[in-house]
């Protein structure tokens, strides 16, 4: 069973930073990061909507405000989780992922407050300029790229802008995820651990899609994923797949 490093193994490194990617690239089959735009449209690697702890955000930097309102200098000076690591650009991180490791890029937000999981979110037209910027940022990436998102609009824009780049349908509800994966011709389904089942995996496999489960935080999760027949885990820690028969490089 394959391991994809969630935010660059967020359990052992400052999430979504260059340091996290460097930590993960030798210990995983894939590295996953979240992307959204800075104020000038540059794709940057960050999960929450805000740099501070307002609203639903966790306050993982010493900067303030929405990510998409921050200029590149503010993001370069921000300190992620008191690690000394800044918020990196996607183009910087993309150069750190080697050719033998998949680079999973989650299209998190095109720069609007209503892009929240569980809502319909922006349509493809709203996502397209950002996805075009993502394509430019990935131009020099040597690793095979997979684009993923919870949002239909993002996946639709990805099919238009980067039609040859594989896509993965992220979901909270596996049934909706299976429908989304079919609608946008996704190579993979990324389903939550607590929604995974043998029937979901079998359905995806019948359609020619792989299944990766998120977010795996311990060996019990990994074993449950293996029992359901998942192809991979999106994990916070290296080595968890070894408990479920993962390859030796993940130990």
Image (cartoon, rainbow, N blue to C red):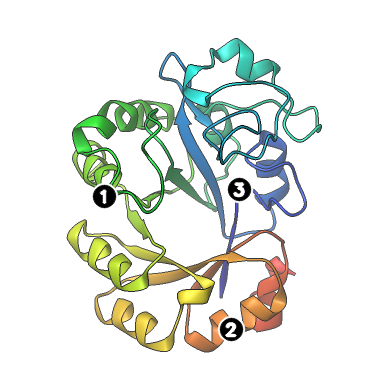
Residue 166 screen position, x and y as percent: 32, 53
The tag earlier along the polypeptide, 2 or 1, is: 1
Q: Quadrant of residue 75?
A: top right
Residue 26 screen position, x and y as percent: 69, 53
Q: Badge 1, how many Cα within 10 Å: few under 14, some, many 20+?
A: many
> Is 171 positioned to the left or the right of 217 in the image?
left
Q: 122 or 157, which is in the foreground?
A: 122
Q: Badge 2, how many Cα within 10 Å: few under 14, some, many 20+?
A: some
The tag earlier along the polypeptide, 3 or 1, is: 3
Q: Which residue is mark 3?
A: 7
| Quadrant (top left/top right/bottom left/bottom right) for the N terminus | bottom right
The tag earlier along the polypeptide, 3 or 2, is: 3
State the residue at coordinates (37%, 32%).
110
Q: Quadrant of residue 220?
A: bottom right
| Quadrant (top left/top right/bottom left/bottom right) for the C terminus | bottom right
Residue 250 screen position, x and y as percent: 69, 67
Q: Determine whether label 3 and label 2 are within 8 Å by CB.
A: no
Q: Is residue 104 above or below residue 108?
A: below
Kindly state the secondary structure of the residue where label 3 is placed. loop
What numbered label is drawn on residue 224?
2
Q: 195 or 132, which is in the foreground?
A: 195
Q: Which residue is mark 1?
A: 152
Q: Nearer the viewer, mark 3 or mark 1?
A: 1
Q: 97 or 106, which is in the foreground?
A: 106
| Cα distance between the residues tagged 2 and 1 | 28 Å
State the residue at coordinates (70%, 16%).
77
> Is 183 positioned to the left or the right of 167 in the image?
left
């Amino acid at each position: 069973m394959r391991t994809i490093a969630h935010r660059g193994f967020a359990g052992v490194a400052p999430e979504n930073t260059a340091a996290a990617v460097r930590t993960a690239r030798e210990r995983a089959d894939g590295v996953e990061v979240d992307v959204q735009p800075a104020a000038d449209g540059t794709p940057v690697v960050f999960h929450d909507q805000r740099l501070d702890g307002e609203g639903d955000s966790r306050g993982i930097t010493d900067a303030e405000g929405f990510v998409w309102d921050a200029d590149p200098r503010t993001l370069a000076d921000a300190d992620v989780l008191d690690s000394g690591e800044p918020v990196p650009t996607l183009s910087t991180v993309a150069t750190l992922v080697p050719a033998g490791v998949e680079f999973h890029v989650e299209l998190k937000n095109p720069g609007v407050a209503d892009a929240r999981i569980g809502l319909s979110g922006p349509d493809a037209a709203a996502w397209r300029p950002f996805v075009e910027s993502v394509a430019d940022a990935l131009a020099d990436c040597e690793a095979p790229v997979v684009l993923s998102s919870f949002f239909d609009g993002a996946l639709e824009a990805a099919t238009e802008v980067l039609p040859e780049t594989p896509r993965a349908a992220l979901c909270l509800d596996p049934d909706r995820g299976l429908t989304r994966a079919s609608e946008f011709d996704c190579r993979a389904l990324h389903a939550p651990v607590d929604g995974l089942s043998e029937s979901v995996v079998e359905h995806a496999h019948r359609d020619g899609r792989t299944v990766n489960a998120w977010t795996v935080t311990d060996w019990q999760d990994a074993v449950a994923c293996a029992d359901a027949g998942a192809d991979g885990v999106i994990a916070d820690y290296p080595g968890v797949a070894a408990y479920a028969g993962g390859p030796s490089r993940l130990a």
